[in-house]
Image (cartoon, rainbow, N blue to C red):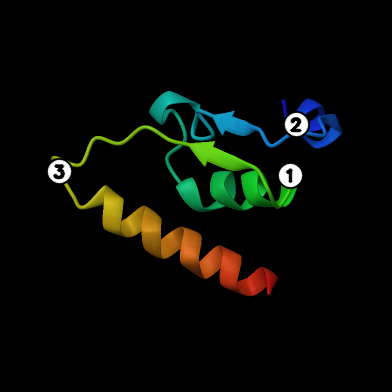
Amino acid sequence: MYKVIRATKKPCFAFKIMAAGRINNPEPAFKQAFESIKPTDGVFIGLFPRAKDEVRENAERVQRLLRKKV
C-alpha cells in the first residue's frame, strides 16, 4: 500500500494503519505510516475511546512523531 501511495502524484490517505485493532502497540504503526507516505498524504485510523482517551493519546503520538521529523 505504501509503495503505491508514494508513487501516486496526488495526495492519498492510508487506511487502517493499525490493522483494525490487531496491532497492540500503535507507536510503530504510526511511525511506519508517517515514514512511508508523502508530506501531502494523511492517515485514517479507527477509534474505540470508551476504555481510554484514544483521541488524546493518538493526537499526542502524532504530534511527537511529526515533531521529530522537523
Q: Determine contact: label 2, label 3, CB under 8 Å.
A: no
Q: Residue furthest right?
A: 7
The residue labelled by disc 1 is 36
Task: Identify the residue at image location x=69%, y=37%.
Answer: 11
Q: Nearer the viewer, mark 2 or mark 1?
A: 2
33 vs 44, nearest the viewer: 44
Q: CA distance from mark 2 to mark 3?
A: 33 Å
The residue that appears at 50% across and 28% down in the rendered structure is: 16
- Where 69 falls versus 27 (above or below)? below
On screen, residue 53 versus residue 47, left or right, reads left
- Counting residues from the N terminus, which is met first, the one under dot 2 or under dot 3? 2
Picture layout, residue 21 above or below residue 65? above
The image shows residue 37, relative to residue 13, as above or below, that is below
Q: What residue appears at the point 48 percent right and 66 percent down from the top-left corner?
A: 63
Q: Which mark is drawn over residue 51? A: 3
Residue type (three-letter) at the residue carrying disc 1: Ser
Q: Secondary structure at mark 2?
A: helix
* Marks 1 and 3, how far apart at CA: 30 Å
Which quadrant of the view contains residue 13? top right
Disc 1 is placed on an element classified as helix
Which numbered disc flags the more N-terminal residue, 2 or 1? 2
What residue is shown with label 2?
A: 5
Density class for disc 1 (Cα within 10 Å; few <14, some 14-19, many ≥20) is some
List x then y, in percent, for residue 46: 36, 32
Residue at the spot x=63%, y=44% of the render?
33
Q: Earlier in the sequence, mark 1 or mark 3?
A: 1
Q: Pinpoint residue 62: horizontal percent, then vertical percent.
A: 49, 59
Residue 28 drawn at (x, y percent):
58, 50
